Amino acid sequence: MKRFLLLAMPVMLPFLAMGQFTLKGKITDQKTGELLPGANVQIEQSFKAASCDAAGVYEIKGLKKGNYTVVVSYLGYTQEERQINLNGDLVLDLALVLSPVLQEEIVISATRAGDKSPTAFENISKVEINTLNLGQDLPYLLDETPSAVVSSDAGAGVGYTGIRIRGTDITRINVTVNGIPLNDQESQGVFWVNMPDFSSSVDNIQVQRGVGTSTNGPAAFGASINIQTLKLNPEAYAETNNSYGSFNTWKNNILVGTGLLNGKWAFDGRLSRISSDGFVDRGKSNLSSYFLSGGYYGEKCFFRLNVLSGKEKTYQAWMGIPKDSLETNRTYNPFTYENQTDNYRQDHYQLFYGQRLGKRWDLNLAAFLVRGIGYYEEWQDILDPWGNTAFADYGLPDQIIGNDTITNSSLVRRKWLDNYYYGLTFSSIYDNKKNLKLTLGGSASRYDGDHYGTLEWMQIAGSTTQGQRWYQGKGLKTDANVFVKADINLGKHINLFADIQYRYVQHDISGLDAKLRTLDQIHEFNFINPKAGINYQITKKHRVFASFAMTGREPNRSNFADADPGKPMPVAEQLMDVETGYDFTLSTFKMSLNGFYMYYKDQLVLTGEINDVGSSIMTNVPKSYRAGIEISAGWSPLQWFKWDINAALSSNKILNFTEYVDTYDVAWNFSQQQNYLGTTELSFSPAIVAGNVFRFEPVKNFDIQLISKYVSRQYIDNSAAKARSLDPFFVNNVLLRYHFRTRIIKEIGISALVNNLLNEKYETNAWVYRYIYDGSETISDGYFPQAGRNFLVSLSLRF
């Protein structure tokens, strides 16, 4: 708690020195002289920004004497920068030039929150992404955002990585790329390992916490992550980024772009490879990817085709290590079979068309296809009591050798996924530039996936052939939605927001699963998801907002496939989200305070219940909630120093919770014990998450960042037992970055990142299976320790 109070000091200290001068003016169209209400005016060297009112007028108060860069932007116009020397009140009128080509912001604008949206969000710019992008997966670049906790199976941020926001995992976080859903339609998760070095092709990211605004794809049950890939770069470029670090970690890429050819065409490309041995034993990753993009840009329309391909081979580290090995052998990996690997390739094809329909209407259409195929291979040892080695497990007859009947065999098997995911998205935006903005959007998609398993080797094979399938199942899922949003400006101070979405889902599951259970079932869902809010701009310095949203989420494939056929099927979850916020801004200080209450009906959680073949299942619990406050603040009293901090304090509860514990007698007869626990903690939902960043620039172009993260206790299951929890951790990183120019090379960047500077021993994820044998409790578990002190160094060249 003391560490948290230390991190929170800048919010509480009375250091807010007032500025002296005011900058104001009008923003107009250079050709027509038309006023541009809503144009954004940003002072780069401060936290100050303003939007033009209905008269096209902006005003920024509280600026100190000094030199500033004023940046003015407006959708459809070329960004304008102006250097000013402020030593008194200044009137600065600026005229923007209509962009000669239609800009790509319209691709993602339908699903983004704006400056006056009544929701909590963070924008991460390309500069911020590139600063931290030394080879770790994209979740690690979002670790500084409020309420975020990241994890890595191999312990070093490469390979299988994950992120939780407000305690919700990636299966409950909506992720889109250019407005196109990225979540896997069956599991509803996102596997970043399938998109190596994707961050190098990203221009900006918006993270909305809570339900947020309507988007495409699965419901946002804790947050949404909206990603935009590289936008039009009018100048030709070539770039290479090369990193090396602990655990033999390498990242190499090459990026090239033609710039705007003949004022109409542009092409970009990236080729990448990343490899790492990982912190844990045999936690190796071998990843490669490429990104190709080409487009035509007209004055009122554009076409663009993106192709993204990723290929991964990772040694499995997803079992974790037993708790009793954490102190003696933190790199232990129970898998020793030489080819215990995960192998997958995923290709993304995205085609965009944007059209400007006069001065007030924009239209965007997109078609997409995602092709994925791969498998993971595993060894099943006849000596392992938990192994699957019986011939009956694979629908095979027992083998008779002489007078002996053989019922089991060691074997190697593969589990395959072979899928296609394709669809369309659209949005149409009307903006009268004064007091009304309407958005009509939506999507329709189809997922077609095959699941099957093959036997690659058996110690006692009999008539079984290599590659013979023992199960095969299919998943077909249709997902369609349409939404309407309205932003209404009621004068100088009040903005209203309304949003309603209809979403239809049909999920058809058939065939057999790996345990040879019949899966044939069809489920349909209809969701009506309303949202409404108000933003009140009290003064230029103070803003408050409030919103209410509802959304529904369907169970995923495993929830249905693992359900006990003799019991009721899982039902859809419902979420009601109330958000309130307050923003306070001065020239050297900015603070945002957000409160939230997220009430869940029928949330799916692990209770310990099992199905008819003994596998754990997720069960709907009637009532649960997340409630808390999020604080973020920044202080920049000097041009060479900036202090950023964020903290989330929350209460995350299940009401009237009953746990189920497997019990066995000495003859291994099975039953389940029920324990009513009342109100308990939601698993992996820390009460405190806090981040702190000190940024220094002691000399020009040389940056130093001291980055800290504190996460309080996390419970592994929903029983709130301390014995089954992750200890709190406080981790500190240091980033050094120096960049300069030469006559030949436009920019040379040298970076060094030291992670876990103080060599903290901590774990970010775990699983546990608890059962009672002959009256005594027994635990099987797996913890995921993160690397101790480690480093990455990088050299970047841009031509």
Image: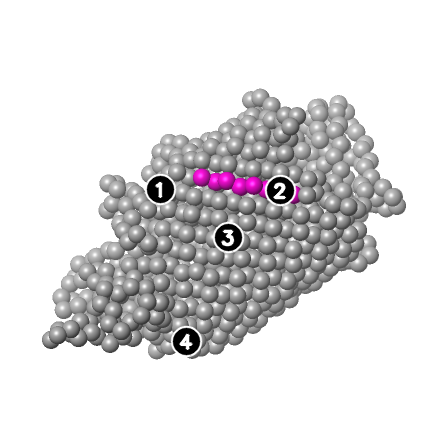
How far apart, in angstroms, are the residues tagged by discs 2 and 1? 33 Å
Q: Position of residue 89 (x, y in %)?
A: 78, 28
Q: Position of residue 304 (x, y in %)?
A: 68, 54
Question: Disc 1 designates what residue?
Answer: 279
Q: How packed is label 4: few (under 14 Cα within 10 Å), some, or many (20 or more)? A: some
How far apart, in angstroms, are the residues tagged by discs 3 and 2? 18 Å
Q: Earlier in the sequence, mark 2 or mark 1?
A: 2
The region drawn magenta spans: 250-257
Question: Disc 3 designates what residue?
Answer: 310
How far apart, in angstroms, are the residues tagged by discs 2 and 4? 46 Å
Where residue 126 sits, quadrant-wise, is top right
**Secondary structure category for the residue under label 3:** strand
How far apart, in angstroms, are the residues tagged by discs 3 and 4? 29 Å
Residue in the foreground of this view, choosing between 454 and 558: 454
How far apart, in angstroms, are the residues tagged by discs 3 and 1? 23 Å
- Tell me if I can see residue 523 in this picture: yes
Label ID, residue 511: 4
